[in-house]
Amino acid sequence: MTPIALAQPGWPFSSLSFRAFQCWLTVYRRIWRSSIWSMVLGPVCYLGALGFGLGSLVDKHSTASLGGVPYLAFLAPALLATGAMNAAVGEASYPVFGSLKWNRIYIGAQASPLRPAHIFRGHLMFMAMRIAMNCAVVVLVMWAFGAIRSAWVVLAYPAAVLTGLAFAAPIAAWAVTVTVDTSFNYIFRFVVMPLMLFSGTFFPLSQLPAGLRALAYATPLWHGVALCRAFSLGTAPRDPVGMLGHVAYLAVLAGVGIWAGARTYRRRLYV
Amino acid sequence: MSYPAASLDQVLEPSETEVLVRARALTKRFGSFTAVDGIDFDLYRGEAFGFLGPNGAGKSSTMRMIGCVSPPTSGDLSILGRDPVKDGSVIRARLGVVPQEDTLDMELSVRENLLVYGRYFGLPRRVIRDRTAELLEFVQLADRAKDKVEPLSGGLKRRLTIARSLINEPEILLLDEPTTGLDPQARHVVWDRLFRLKQRGVTLILTTHYMDEAEQLCDRLVVMDHGRFAAEGSPRDLIARYCSPEVLELRFDPDVQDTAADKLKDFSAERTEVLADRILLYVPDGDAALGAVRASGLEPLTSLVRRGTLEDVFLRLTGRRLED
């Protein structure tokens, strides 16, 4: 009989998490073709309808409040950050819930050497991969639409992925504790939609009343939008401290989510 | 660390002395509810051990603790000589688990399900490929290897779950109600496969509320009720201890059942049980007892003499009440 590679106690955690990630890859291999189309369709529709359609009206007036760039160039990086958020919420809500209740992937994995923290991190790796794929498609569509103004855009891509992780990790950590799937509607309605509309995505925050503006500054999506936009428009070098601030905010949020997820998964799976 | 216990075509002699699972005062509480109430047991390598009991008796909670996915509230538990809380991951690498409800991935093919599972255990793809062929042969699913899981029947899914649980060549196989919901044919195929695993030296730990399953598979069993052991022993021991060799079942006209029951109380049966539709007499010799009943002037509508079974033991120990 062939020798067996056992889970040795000293192995780094990462390799066990990677095993859980591989499970998700195997599942995804079956559906990746159909998922490509939905990834492309979203940014094409938004950039076409809003960037070109609405943008042609906006650009007839002064674009000074947009930083003097065409509306398309203003909007596109915000859609990159927003797309990352949407992908994150999509991957971290129902799929996490379903892994407990519907296809019970977590329950199956639990009987193996994987610990709840590995199951969580493995799934999070897959979420990160899906977010990265989504962002890559959006960057390509932005480029095809001529919406990119600077070579700094290569940093807008990791910034968008980080924005996605800042949503995915905390939401997954929470989603595993959810007992009825209707809870997710609250996230979609009361978190995702307002964030998408009021984070400087479609119009600059300077247009908001001061009170609301302060609230918007506190939300994670605004930091992601600001970061992506500064890189896409090439204005980032003018404000390196601000950029670091955005990165720090998003990294802390992602870090708290990763820390919390290991605990909530454990509490939910080891009863 | 001795591993693997047995490849599928190798027969190991069960050693009665090696304790694989040891529990002392093992307790599991959920809030104020005590699911497992201070039980003690030793499970030996190579045996088939059964936890019997009605729903809610604490069988599954015990299994989850042995499966290292549920930390005990108190008491001692050691599995393969290790602490399940500290070394859960290492212990689980040597266990196979067949859960009560299948956790197969319906989107994937039969073979992919084994691949994913083998990867969880860190097995190289080549090893998984070889074992998959061997295991699908073993559970008679080789011709379905490329099929999607979703449309498979309940019996086939169960067999796939069993094959999947063996991918890491476990020393102990935990089976939580392995044949619940299967038709008789499918149950017999599962029993046959489990019996062959046992012959190959795999230690089986199972829960069931089917007495025929326990009689077929278990060397030793415990009857659980309210989180405790009501009895333990081999199926034969338990029948000898808690039941009579034979049972006489008598059915009377409903109008005369009560008077018949009164009269039968005077009979020298070990125990008499009056049910809604029949009266059971637990006796050493059923035919002799039936003769005596008739001689006393009672004429049952129908009568049946049968051997005492584990089901009689079970009902005696856990009662005929309905829970949950």
Image (cartoon, grey):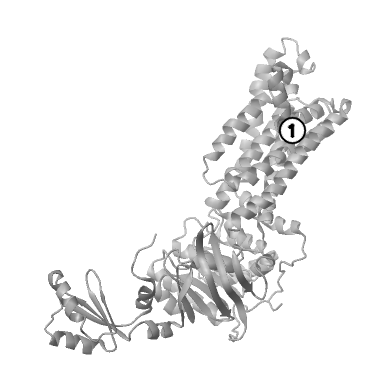
Question: In the rendered image, which quarter contains the C terminus of chain B?
Answer: bottom left
Q: Position of residue A197 (x, y in %)?
A: 64, 25
Q: Would you say residue A6 is visible in this rendering? A: yes
Q: Position of residue A145 (x, y in %)?
A: 72, 26
Q: Is residue A178 above or below residue B194?
A: above
Residue type at mark 1: give it. Val
Q: Position of residue B7 (x, y in %)?
A: 62, 78
* Side of B137 where B254 appears, left or right: left
The picture quadrant where one finds residue A10 is bottom right
Q: Position of residue B119 (x, y in %)?
A: 67, 62
Q: Is residue A116 above or below residue A173?
A: below
Residue found 74% across the figure and 67% down from its top: A8
Q: Would you say residue A151 is visible in this rendering? A: no
* Side of B286 where B57 appears, left or right: right
Q: What element does badge 1 sit on?
A: helix
Q: Which residue is mark 1?
A: A139
Question: In the rendered image, which quarter contains the N terminus of chain B?
Answer: bottom right
Residue found 61% across the figure and 68% down from its top: B167
Given residues B27 and B284, the one toward you in this image is B27
* Side of B287 where B78 appears, left or right: right
Q: Residues within 10 Å of mark 1 (few under 14, many from 20)?
A: many
Q: Residue furthest front?
A: B32
Q: Residue furthest left?
A: B297
Residue at mark 1: chain? A
The picture quadrant where one finds residue A209 is top right
Given residues B248 and A75, the one toward you in this image is B248
